[in-house]
């Protein structure tokens, strides 16, 4: 059986742009101080629905932002920041979002929903992650994290603990209309459809933010639960087209190189017996690969006369 070593050359480095980033340390403490910052706006007109605090988690997080707690002017409140981004012109169709969040449960008899939402340039809410704070002991409770695509909702089957801090990490591919999300490193969902909004909106990034939706349509029947936000970072990146590899074995237990490639690049199998400079060769038969498909799995089985110990790599070129 051959001993096969694979070396992946990372020839493509993604340089991105920070669209927005804050740890809230530059904000003033007090009611309505989150939306007092010029980068943020809200459709709420009552005092105390958003706030900046410096006492959460025994002051370990520094300043944090909050949404909820007091009676709002409407049954759904949005706090948004503008993040206009032309992913077609820039070529940066990958959006990474990371935020630290926690939910304080209600002390009264009402419990509500909180959202992290993404909007396009027409003001259409494309997608959201909903944090449903329904009583988990209630019959048929929806308590936990949900995915919404602008039309339908999907249970991620992941719950949360009140007053625990969670690292929410989101990756959106605007070009392919897919996204993935994780909480503290554990997947909520992977490569799901990003948006199916009924209006057939343009898929672009214009604003993101947090929302509070009351269970009741009457703003007087609000839960005094609230969402705490400790940090927020939004970055745009170009797609990483570097191949990812695995090794499979055929019926003779000989290794097969397997990787996913994309339309555009050419993939060339190269080999070396020594790894010495200038020792890489690309003369193996049927060792050049291209595709017109958006994504394709390639397979290469080294010829039977290959040495028992040989190094292989896949060189990617445009």
Image: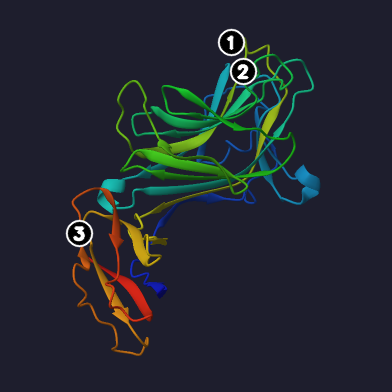
Q: Residue 169, percent across and down?
A: 54, 46
Comparing marks 1 and 3, which lies closer to the viewer? 3
The span from disc 2 to disc 3 (Cα, nearest Å) is 52 Å
Q: In which quarter of the image is the C terminus?
A: bottom left
Relative image position of residue 180 (x, y in whole percent):
47, 42
Q: Does residue 20 show up?
A: yes
Point out which mark residue 217 bears: 1
Q: Distance between the residues labelled 2 and 1?
A: 7 Å
Residues at marks 2 and 1 touching, judged by CB atoms closer than 8 Å = yes
The reply to whether the C-beta atoms of the residues labelled 1 and 3 are less than 8 Å apart is no
Tell me if residue 299 comes above or below residue 280 in the rendering: above
On the image, the x and y values in percent for residue 150 come to 42, 25
For the point 34% across and 42% down, which residue is it?
174
- Which of the two marks, 2 or 3, is nearer to us in this view? 3
Query: Can you say whether 201 is above or below 208 in the image?
Result: above
Q: Where is residue 3 in the image (x, y as percent from the top left)?
A: 43, 75
| Up-down relation of residue 241 to residue 284 (above or below) | above
Q: Residue 290 carries which label?
A: 3
Residue 33 falls left or right of residue 19: right
Decide which of 43, 298 is in the foreground and name it: 298
Q: Residues within 10 Å of mark 2 (few under 14, many from 20)?
A: many
Q: Which residue is pictured at 41% across the width and 65% down the height?
A: 253
In this figure, which residue is indicated by the disc labeled 2?
214
Rounded to the nearest whole Å, what is the CA distance between mark 1 and mark 3?
56 Å
């Amino acid at each position: 059986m051959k001993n096969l070593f694979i070396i992946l050359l990372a020839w493509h480095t993604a340089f991105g742009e920070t669209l927005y980033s804050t740890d809230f340390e530059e904000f003033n403490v007090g009611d309505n101080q989150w939306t007092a910052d010029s980068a943020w706006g809200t459709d709420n007109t009552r005092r105390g629905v958003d706030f900046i605090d410096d006492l959460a988690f025994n002051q370990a997080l520094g300043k944090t932002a909050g949404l909820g707690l007091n009676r709002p002017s409407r049954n759904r409140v949005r706090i948004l920041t503008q993040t206009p981004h032309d992913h077609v012109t820039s070529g940066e169709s990958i959006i990474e979002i990371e935020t630290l969040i926690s939910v304080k449960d209600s002390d009264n008899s009402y419990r509500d929903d909180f959202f992290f939402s993404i909007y396009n340039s027409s003001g259409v809410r494309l997608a959201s992650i909903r944090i449903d704070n329904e009583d988990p002991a209630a019959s048929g409770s929806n308590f936990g994290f949900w995915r919404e695509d602008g039309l339908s909702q999907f249970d991620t089957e992941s719950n949360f603990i009140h007053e625990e801090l969670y690292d929410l990490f989101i990756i959106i591919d605007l070009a392919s209309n897919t996204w993935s999300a994780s909480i503290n490193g554990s997947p909520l969902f992977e490569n799901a459809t990003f948006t199916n909004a009924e209006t057939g909106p343009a898929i672009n990034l214009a604003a993101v933010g947090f929302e509070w939706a009351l269970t009741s349509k009457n703003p007087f029947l609000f839960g005094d639960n609230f969402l705490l936000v400790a940090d927020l970072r939004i970055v745009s990146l170009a797609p990483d087209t570097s191949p990812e590899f695995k090794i499979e074995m055929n019926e003779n237990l000989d290794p097969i190189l397997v990787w996913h490639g994309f339309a555009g690049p050419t993939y060339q199998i190269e080999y070396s017996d020594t790894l010495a400079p200038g020792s890489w060769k690309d003369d193996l038969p049927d060792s050049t690969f291209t595709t017109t498909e958006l994504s394709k799995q390639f397979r290469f089985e080294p010829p039977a006369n290959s040495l028992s110990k040989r190094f292989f790599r896949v060189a990617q070129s445009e």
